[in-house]
Amino acid sequence: MTQPPNPYESGLLEQADLLWQDDGAPFSTHYGDVYFSRNGGLAETHHVFLEGNLLQQRWREQDTREHPGVFTVCELGFGTGLNFLSSWRLWQQTDCKRLRLHYISCEKHPLAHAALGRALQQWPELSEFSAALLQNYPDHSAGYHRIPMLLPSDKHQTPGTISILLDLYFGDAQDLLNQQSNQGAKIDAWFLDGFTPSQNPALWSEEILNTVARLSRSGSTLSSYSVTGRVVRHLKTLGFNVEKRKGFGPKRHMLFAHMEQEAVPCQPGVQTAVVIGAGLAGATVANSLAVRGIRVTVIEQAAEIAGGASGNRQAIVQLRLNKQLDSQWQFHVHSYLYALRFYSHLDALSESLPNWHPCGVLTLNSAYTNTREAADSNTLRHTYAHYPSAILQALDATQASSLTGLELQEDGLWQAGGGWMNPKKCCMTCLTHPLITVLTQTRASKLTYDNNEWTVHCETNIKADAVVIANSFAARTFEQTSDVPVTPLRGQVSHLPKNSLSSGLKQVICSQRYIAPADLEGHHCIGASYVKQSIDTGLTTLEHQENIQKLGGLAVILGFENQLPDSGRAGLRGASRDYMPIAGAVPDSRLPADVYGGALLVRRHEPEGEKDSEDFPRLPGLYLSTGHGSHGSVSCPIIAEHLAALICGEHSPLPRALSDEIDPVRFIRRQRRQQQARR
């Protein structure tokens, strides 16, 4: 079997090519069609898609259930976002108390940000919603973009609450939908709103309609303005009951279809979970579970939360760079983009002082002294040309000096969206959710599974439907995860009080060490050292000296070249063998090797709808989040969402190509390949 196309293979997107009509409406030159009805786009959306799928009625009914869960809408053709914004407004008006709304929309040619803003001026009644969308809208990278949406009026909610979750799938809809890593996740309502079938046949093909049927939940509905005969006929062959209803405006008919509701009793999903570890990995996943209505107990053996590497005063949120455009590149880009949204969202819901400081991150060429990087901006620009300029820009020394206000002598790479935050404060904010209970000074000694539930053995044994091990390299202390290849990586940061020269530092600047702008207490964090296989957390003068020395010329510019730090902190991070996080369902290593698929290489991807014949057995309800290394501030938030989606049976923010990069089973696959190669 062949591997399905990687939806990220092009890296960059081809944006929509528009003409603007006299009435201000956008017209697609690529498809030769309008984006919305000239007879009233907002009214058409309400008639065809919102009323057409009986959304408000279904939301109210589902909200009264004992376990309401999530209602998922999937749209083929995001366009100007009108359907999404209208759905969001209706959702706010419906005021569901426990049901959550997840809106997924596919778009091959997204509008540029400025064009979207111009198009949305058509509907001033949606201005509050439009402003929130524009604040978060990406128009530069292919793949899945998870965006927690929030209105100013939502800020009274519990930290971590999501008003509505938007997933934008930028690229080919068929490929992106088939790449969903959690194929058990289903859709409740479909909006088929691509350009007319005669102009955009790919979005109305039998193949994509097959995918729609496969991903539809029992009772799922579908609506569209198009009643093209071949579409109607194929939907019927797929088991949809199809009706032609009164259309909008001059259109005589619209399409409505639904799957029969199976008479199967509603089975509650995971209701309780234990998260082992109260650092950033554990706190973010606990929050992602709690906002989905799961009662979470967080176990931490230290006396306080964020006692490990997550206890540093400042953590840098920056993109981990890759020279090749591959799945690891995609993972790092989308982890970074989601982390920026996550920290901004968390700050918006917090009543305390801002914790997220998106000041930007400048990495100077001296950071690459031990590599073969050339030290000029033209080479950097060429080497990293696969990054959109909205994410990464190469600057020469003059531009870098102008940006920072410092007399820099080096070229560098600028990440305008990056910045710094206090990881312990972030953990505290995540863990304030009322469904989360934190037990400090509590050590989990072992895990046992019986009668469809886990027991976490500690001073008071705790039973739960699911367990997430998020305690860094200590994950190896449990029998089920004793062979996980994660090892300690010591890192010492140095604290220096700001002075007259450094007080003007506004951006994070990285040489072979980073320095962040002064925190609220007036200290800069400089770090961090890298000492493998060490579990010593005592401070050393040598590592303080190295931190200052490896700032290079920055130490002189900021007046720190002869100053020894007055304090610091050493923490232990967990690093994996391949320096990628280890996150996902734990493989069952107790089974014979041949059960894992033997030595038959990586799992094969079967035709859509068929079971993956080489899927590896997993321990039910047991998950890992470890191996984040020095980039946990970026990788933890999206991995928390990925694990919550796997646990709750929802759509993951990571497509299969990216979830495979962090899957714990990847080491077993590689071992099998090596064994096969030796035969």
Image: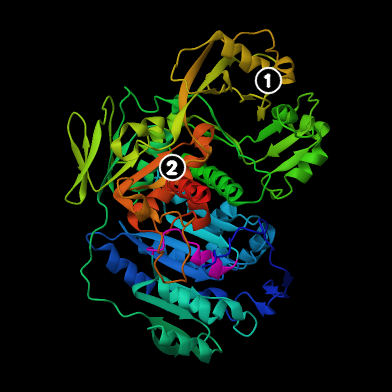
Amino acid found under the numbered disc labelled 2: Leu
Residue 576 lies within the magenta run: no
Q: Nearer the viewer, residue 260 or 610?
A: 610
Identify the image quadrant of residue 239: bottom left
Q: Nearer the viewer, residue 314 or 369?
A: 369
Relative horizontal placement of residue 288, taking residue 489 as reference (left or right):
left
Residue corresponding to mark 2? 349
Q: Is the residue under label 2 in contact with that under label 1 (CB below 8 Å)?
A: no
Relative horizontal placement of residue 346, taking residue 404 as reference (left or right):
left
Magenta highlight range: 172-185
Residue at x 46%, y 40% (from the top left corner): 636
Q: Please provide percent x and percent y for residue 221.
A: 39, 77
Relative horizontal placement of residue 552, taking residue 303 as reference (left or right):
right
- Closer to the observer: label 1 or label 2? 1
Amino acid found under the numbered disc labelled 1: Leu
Residue 176 lies within the magenta run: yes
Residue at x 42%, y 25% (from the top left corner): 308
Q: Nearer the viewer, residue 230 or 192?
A: 230
Q: Please tell me the numbered disc located at residue 188.
A: none
Between the residue at mark 1 and the residue at mark 2, the CA separation in whole angstroms equals: 36 Å
Q: Please tell me the numbered disc located at residue 551.
A: 1
Residue 351 in view of the camera:
no
Q: Dot 1, how many residues are within 10 Å of its Cα: few (below 14), some (14-19), or many (20+)? A: many
Q: Residue furthest front?
A: 679
Q: Please provide percent x and percent y for residue 103.
A: 46, 63
Q: Callout 1: helix, strand or loop?
A: loop
- Relative height, residue 28 to residue 336 (above, below): below
